[in-house]
Image: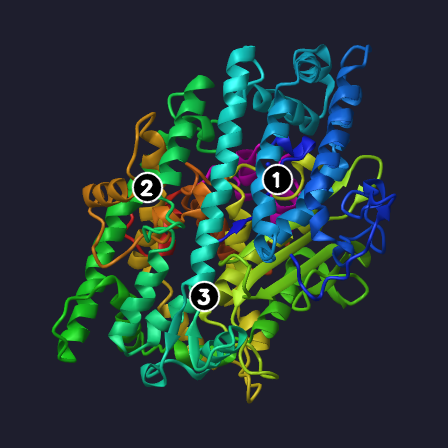
């Protein structure tokens, strides 16, 4: 499961939310024996082409902490200047300068965020433990600034509100309510308590994520040649490359999803599958100095106390209030409507797999480390589909070109490779994005796994689009963890990885399409349970014949994927939906239950086990993200009490996709224009439910979700 990555807590974004490598060229700014931070590229405006670009090659990592200290000082001066005005508060003299405040801190956070996610090596982990509490304290300082809040409140209650545009009204309304939700109206004593809680949480979040990253980097599996039976050649090549990177002989399976899943799917050695499964799903749960259980218990307790302090029943109630769903009850209603249908499907899937295992003479019951392996055997039996036959047609670079081409056909974008801007790693490629022949933004692509890079796939923004007097173009990135193969050979990826590529590119297109005036409303700055809608609908273009015929070509012959193979993929589209839905929903339900438990002390492992038993979680499936490694909800507040968002957004996606199906093509001009105009380009300038209604012509029909997953519609 993927996500957009946000480290930011800069001033404008507070309203809506918050290495030492040889390839770095470092620049000294020594002056009188110290650092002249005013000339530090971490703080100065970005220069270069395309309206300025991140100065990756000028970054000196030892400057991060003092740069944050200086940037926070500069941001505070911006806020104080807004609050010190004597003129009557207006949108122009309060909200507009607030949007522009803390620009240096915003830029700094985005550069540091890439280091903590893509380059987390050397001194970066220690720096993050210092920076996170600093940023938490600063965020609270902004929210608790009485002079600033009084001006926002005055604008919110003013007659001017009636004359503002819809986007301006929404900006004021959301800003005011965000400040209130985060404690602006608390008394001084409670504000101090809240700041302490937030600072403690920031430190715990960092410790949690660093522990998971540590287990991903340090706990790997060394494989003997005798254990390679069944594994595709491309997977074996990747394991050999991983061993070489670690300066080891033989083969290494990294402790990441991209490395784990192929082994569980194809390795004939059951003991190897069990070892790899156990190593992966025990991240953060090994009883050592990287164990996350005590950290989780502390996070949950602090979140519950914060919610009570802010006047909410639980953390879940606090988190859900500004989302589309609004209440935990609505999210539970949707999840529990799908859960029994998914569990019933799992029972059918397990029965089919057990039958195969029994016919082979196995004397065991299907376990969690067997599921993917025997699912593939069933897939071959039922649909005559072997995904190993599909992989030779899935070249990463070809599919990258395909999704860029589709974005051109649907949204009018052109992607031009460029080499005149710095990157933070040699693996990163950069593309200029044009629309109607005009510069529209930049897209960076960082595809490969490496030590110090968190697992999974994600999108983030280096610069958000805005248009306050000058149109500032967006700079976005996609990040993956594909495993390199042999030198000079194309990187072949799985079908699931191809879907994930299109998904994350959907987030990038959301950011690139933005046509908003104010930065805090642009791009992906939308409700958490709406942000996955643009990315999920973009997955549908992978299966279009236009993509498969032109870009899914055999890496040796150049021939397109045979039509009969494509038809097999289509027929098997709902295959194994029990597994994928249950492993996801298991995580989403535990997330919500943890945060509905309230101000109690929780033993995470025990809670997870007992609650899954109450739900009737099939023993053959593990949660997609077990609690001790659940970065979505414990590495920051991002998806906490919000992992349900993927299902909520997929209900929108399934219904919206039927617009294109009814039109007869995913490249239908009218449907494409409507999607761009009402969803991709508007950011948070309108209510997301209204944007969906404008596109679909009505509110969402959640039955489309059941149809998409092949479940019975009652």
Q: Earlier in the sequence, mark 3 or mark 1?
A: 1
Q: Earlier in the sequence, mark 2 or mark 3?
A: 3
**Residue closest to the eye, 522 or 241:** 241
Residue at which label 1 appears = 131
Q: Residue at x 39, y 26 (%)?
A: 304
* Residue 646 seen in the current view: yes
Tell me where the magenta segment starts and ends, as one range.
Answer: 673-700
Q: Nearer the viewer, mark 1 or mark 2?
A: 1
Q: Secondary structure at mark 3?
A: helix
Q: Nearer the viewer, mark 3 or mark 1?
A: 1
Image position, residue 561 (x, y; %): 50, 80
Give the Cα separation between the discs numbered 1 and 2: 32 Å
Whether 520 is drawn above or below 173: the answer is: below
Left-right relation of 309 to 405: left
Left-right relation of 111 to 554: right
Classified by dominant secondary structure, the portion drawn in magenta counts as helix
Q: Earlier in the sequence, mark 1 or mark 2?
A: 1
Q: Which mark is residue 258?
A: 3
Q: Nearer the viewer, mark 2 or mark 3?
A: 3
Image position, residue 219 (x, y; %): 40, 63
Q: Secondary structure at mark 2?
A: helix
**Crowdedness of circle 1 by 10 Å Cα count: few (<14), some, many (20+)?**
many
Give the Cα separation between the discs numbered 2 and 3: 24 Å
**Crowdedness of circle 2 by 10 Å Cα count: few (<14), some, many (20+)?**
many
Q: Secondary structure at mark 1?
A: helix
Residue 675 colored in magenta in the image: yes
Residue at which label 2 appears = 589
Q: Quadrant of the C terminus?
A: top left
Image position, residue 420 (x, y; %): 82, 64
Residue 396 colored in magenta in the image: no
């Amino acid at each position: 499961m993927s996500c957009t990555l946000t480290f930011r807590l800069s001033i404008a974004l507070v309203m809506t939310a918050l290495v030492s490598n040889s390839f770095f060229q470092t620049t000294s700014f020594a002056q009188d024996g110290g650092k002249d931070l005013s000339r530090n590229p971490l703080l100065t405006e970005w220069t270069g082409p395309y309206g300025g670009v991140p100065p990756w090659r000028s970054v000196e990592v030892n400057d991060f902490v003092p740069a944050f200290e200086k940037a926070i000082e500069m941001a505070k001066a911006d806020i104080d200047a807004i609050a010190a005005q004597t003129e009557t508060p207006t949108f122009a003299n309060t909200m507009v300068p607030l949007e522009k405040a803390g620009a240096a801190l915003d830029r700094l956070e985005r550069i540091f965020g890439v280091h903590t996610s893509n380059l987390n090596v050397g001194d970066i982990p220690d720096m993050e433990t210092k920076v996170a509490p600093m940023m938490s304290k600063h965020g609270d300082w902004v929210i608790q600034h009485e002079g600033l809040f009084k001006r926002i409140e005055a604008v919110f209650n003013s007659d001017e509100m009636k004359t503002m545009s819809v986007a301006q009204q929404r900006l004021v309304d959301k800003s005011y309510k965000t400040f209130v939700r985060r404690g602006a109206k608390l008394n001084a004593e409670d504000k101090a308590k809240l700041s302490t809680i937030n600072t403690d949480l920031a430190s715990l979040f960092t410790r949690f994520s660093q522990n998971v990253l540590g287990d991903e980097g340090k706990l790997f599996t060394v494989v003997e040649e005798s254990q390679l039976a069944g594994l595709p050649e491309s997977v074996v090549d990747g394991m050999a490359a991983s061993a070489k990177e670690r300066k080891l002989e033989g083969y290494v399976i990294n402790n990441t999803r991209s490395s784990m899943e192929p082994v569980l799917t194809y390795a004939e050695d059951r003991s190897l599958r069990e070892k790899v499964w156990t190593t992966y799903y025990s991240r953060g749960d090994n009883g050592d100095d990287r164990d996350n259980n005590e950290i989780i218990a502390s996070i949950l307790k602090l979140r519950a106390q914060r919610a009570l302090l802010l006047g909410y029943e639980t953390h879940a109630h606090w988190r859900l209030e500004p989302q589309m769903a609004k209440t935990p009850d609505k999210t539970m209603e949707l999840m529990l409507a799908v859960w029994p249908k998914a569990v019933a499907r799992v029972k059918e899937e397990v029965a089919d797999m057990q039958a195969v295992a029994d016919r082979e003479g196995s004397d065991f019951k299907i376990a969690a480390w067997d599921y993917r392996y025997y699912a593939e055997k069933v897939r071959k039996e039922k649909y005559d589909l072997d995904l190993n036959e599909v992989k030779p047609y899935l070249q990463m670079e070809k599919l990258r070109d395909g999704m860029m081409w589709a974005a051109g056909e649907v949204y009018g974008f052109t992607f031009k490779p460029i080499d005149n801007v710095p990157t933070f790693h040699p693996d990163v490629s950069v593309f200029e994005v044009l629309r109607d022949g005009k510069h529209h933004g930049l897209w960076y692509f960082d595809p490969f796994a490496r030590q110090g890079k968190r697992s999974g796939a994600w999108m983030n923004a280096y610069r958000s689009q805005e248009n306050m007097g000058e149109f500032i173009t967006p700079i976005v990135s996609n990040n993956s963890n594909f495993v390199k193969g042999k030198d000079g050979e194309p990187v072949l990826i799985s079908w699931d990885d191809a879907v994930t590529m299109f998904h994350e590119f959907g987030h990038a297109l959301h950011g690139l399409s933005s046509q908003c005036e104010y930065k805090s409303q642009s791009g992906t700055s939308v409700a958490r349970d709406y942000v996955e809608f643009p990315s999920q609908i973009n997955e549908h273009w992978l299966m279009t014949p236009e993509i498969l015929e032109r870009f899914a070509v055999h890496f040796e012959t150049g021939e397109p994927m045979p039509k009969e193979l494509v038809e097999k993929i289509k027929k098997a589209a709902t295959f194994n939906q029990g597994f994928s839905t249950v492993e996801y929903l298991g995580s989403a339900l535990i997330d919500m239950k943890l945060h509905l438990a309230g101000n109690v002390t929780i033993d995470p492992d025990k809670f997870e086990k007992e609650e899954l038993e109450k739900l009737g979680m099939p023993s053959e499936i593990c949660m997609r993200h077990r609690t001790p490694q659940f970065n979505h909800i414990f590495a920051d507040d991002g998806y906490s009490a919000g992992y349900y968002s993927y299902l909520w957004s997929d209900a929108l996606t399934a219904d919206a996709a039927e617009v294109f199906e009814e039109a007869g093509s995913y490249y239908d001009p009218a449907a494409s224009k409507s999607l761009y105009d009402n969803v991709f380009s508007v950011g948070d300038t309108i209510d997301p439910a209204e944007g969906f209604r404008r596109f679909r012509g009505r509110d969402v029909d959640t039955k489309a979700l059941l149809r998409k997953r092949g479940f019975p519609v009652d």
